[in-house]
Amino acid sequence: MNMLWRFHLLWILLSRADSFSVTVPSSPILVVRGATELLRCEFEPDYNISNLVITWQRQEDLRVVHSFYYEIDQLDRQSADYSGRTKLNHKELAEGNASLSIANIGLKDAGNYMCIVNNRKGTGKGVVQLVYTAFCSEPRLSILLKSTDVTVQYEMEGYPKPEVMWLGSEGQNLTDHLEVSSASDGGLYYLKSSYITQSPVFNVTFTLKNPPAHQEVQRHFNLSYDGNMSSSRSVVVLSVLCFFLLCSTGLLLWLYCRVRSIHTGLM
């Protein structure tokens, strides 16, 4: 009879464990650099949370991201990488919501997170995958004129490695030189792409794509120059143009101030 009772108790515990479920998103969560993201996790509620234990861990190395038991957050067990960045909604714990908020997302936060829940109804867990991305910065243009050729170059940062392409006026692929450095601690790749031509007249389009961030940038560039000019003459011409531009801007500013002062005196 005692053996039968033990078997019955084991069957009850196993059936409770099988019926207890933890629900998490089935698809990866895409998070942009610096954002705050909610990792969703729901379980069968028990309005008495005195026995509730919630543990969020990294699946890769079992670091504790956040833990809750004895009805309070147990922050002394938390990994230093997440200190001051995580939060549970205590008001919704009794309703079966163990979702965790993580602030200031960075590259090191990418990976798999286990949501482990235990209460009087059973124990269960689910895994949430977090994918990191960063919008590419505005491409910075630089132009190098030589007596024999001209180089058009764009520099930018982003994550993951963005896709870049140079297209000609007829849509042909002109992609030539590309340099990509490794991701920094800040979670960004530095990319430098250039197009070199000997033609004095050209029309090209620079295209950048960052698919995870759903970002696409296009910059059209038209240039006509004298291919026989020496480097020094090119510099002189550009310097003269800059001088006249500054003079024109200064003259317009002076006229504006003069008209404003006259208008003020009349009033």
Image (cartoon, grey):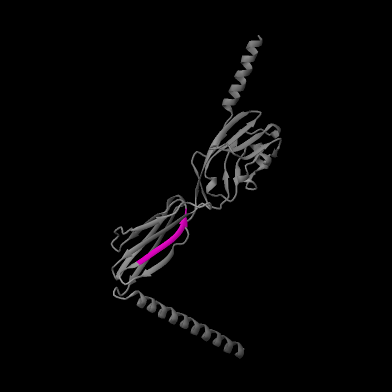
- Please identify the residue farthest to the top as the structure is shown: 1
Nearest the viewer among 62 and 52 is 62
Instruction: Tell me what residue is drawn at x 62 percent, y 22 percent.
Output: 13
Count of numbered circles in the view = 0
The answer to whether residue 21 is above or below residue 170 is above
The answer to whether residue 262 is above or below residue 200 is below
Horizontal and vertical percent position of residue 194: 37, 61
Instruction: Tell me what residue is drawn at x 66 percent, y 34 percent.
Output: 53
Q: Verify whether residue 255 appears in magenta.
A: no
Magenta range:
151-158
Task: State the predominant SS element of the stretch in magenta.
Answer: strand
> Going by the image, does 44 lie left or right of 208?
right
Instruction: Tell me what residue is drawn at x 60 percent, y 18 percent.
Output: 11
Q: Quadrant of the C terminus?
A: bottom right
Horizontal and vertical percent position of residue 31: 52, 48
Horizontal and vertical percent position of residue 84: 65, 48
Q: Quadrant of the N terminus?
A: top right
> Going by the image, does 257 lie left or right of 236?
right
Instruction: Tell me what residue is drawn at x 63 percent, y 44 percent.
Output: 80
Horizontal and vertical percent position of residue 165: 36, 57
> Going by the image, does 251 lie left or right of 92?
left
